[in-house]
Amino acid sequence: MSLERVTCSAHGLPAYLADAGGPCAVAAPRPAIRQEVRTVQLRQWRTDDADALVAAFAEPEMDRQTATPVDTPAAARSWIGRRAEEWGAGTSYAFTVVDAADAVLGNVAVSAVERVHGTGWVSYWTVTAARGRGVATFACRTVSRWAFDDLGLFRLELGHRVDNPASCAVALASGYAVEGLQRQRLAYDGIRHDVEVHARLATDAEPGAGTSSR
Ligand SMILES: CC(C)(COP(=O)(O)OP(=O)(O)OC[C@H]1O[C@@H](n2cnc3c(N)ncnc32)[C@H](O)[C@@H]1OP(=O)(O)O)[C@@H](O)C(=O)NCCC(=O)NCCS
């Protein structure tokens, strides 16, 4: 499998993120698509991302990523506004993942930040056109390092439905060990789903490219 370089240079973030490991290599299963995205950046969501956000939430599998529908530019601006408020309150930090042309590729967030115990909850999604290129993995790794080093958190957690193997692969490749199964944790359309929970500690080894084995 060939490798492609995916780099991060963040805007409006601590200098750490702009230098997050420098260029990093990730597996490239689809070289033709990968050519389109040579650079991945993390930055805070902006109001002018509203149209891209509506398009992202219109895609299959995305309707369950938010409790409130994001189906109009006004709803998207409200979503972005809530992210800014949470950022200001220090409770949650959502980043948009963009390419070199500033097109929105996805979202990665550290939410439920709890300072007493030093914990946070990590989540991510990418737009369909950006998937399978290591974007979510790079974003998750980058935001995790930032949460440990700049937010000072010690333990980051995430969870995914057991029928979401792509999310599991991202978690494992980002250094999140499997900790257990929450039986029938979520209910969608009258069907309950088991959720696998993962966690990564600040003291865990930094994941390297290709560390996605269980
Ligand atoms: C899950 C999601 C974030 C992955 O984003 P992505 O940018 O494609 O992720 P990456 O390219 O970094 O990695 C995807 C991994 O999943 C693997 N994968 C993709 N589809 C898979 C499948 N059906 N079965 C097994 N693995 C799969 C890829 O091979 C890759 O693993 P690898 O790097 O070990 O080869 C994206 O599919 C998405 O946004 N889904 C909808 C929202 C969602 O489910 N969010 C997570 C909620 S817990």
Image (cartoon, rainbow, N blue to C red):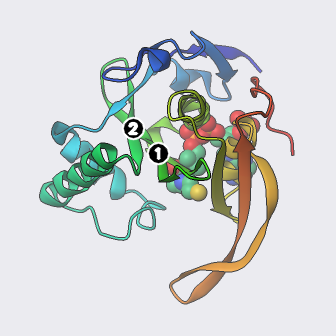
The answer to which quarter of the image holds residue 133 is top right
The answer to which quarter of the image holds residue 28 is top right
Q: Which one is in front, 200 or 173? A: 200
Q: Residues within 10 Å of mark 1 (few under 14, many from 20)?
A: many
The CA span between labels 2 and 1 is 6 Å
Q: Amino acid at mark 1?
A: Ala
The answer to which quarter of the image holds residue 14 is top left
> In this view, which residue lies farthest toward the bottom?
190
Q: Earlier in the sequence, mark 2 or mark 1?
A: 2
Relative horizontal placement of residue 123, taking residue 2 as reference (left or right): left
Q: Position of residue 56 (x, y in %)?
A: 35, 50
Residue that appears at 41% across and 66% down: 63
Residue that appears at 25% across and 50% down: 85
> In this view, which residue lies farthest toward the right?
214
Residue 132 visible in rendering: no
Q: Are marks 2 and 1 in contact (CB under 8 Å)?
A: yes
Q: Amino acid at mark 2?
A: Phe
Relative horizontal placement of residue 105, taking residue 53 as reference (left or right): right
**Which residue position holds label 2?**
95
Residue that appears at 60% across and 33% down: 148
**Which residue position holds label 1?**
109
Q: Residues within 10 Å of mark 2 (few under 14, many from 20)?
A: many
User: As displayed, is residue 193 above or below residue 12?
Assistant: below
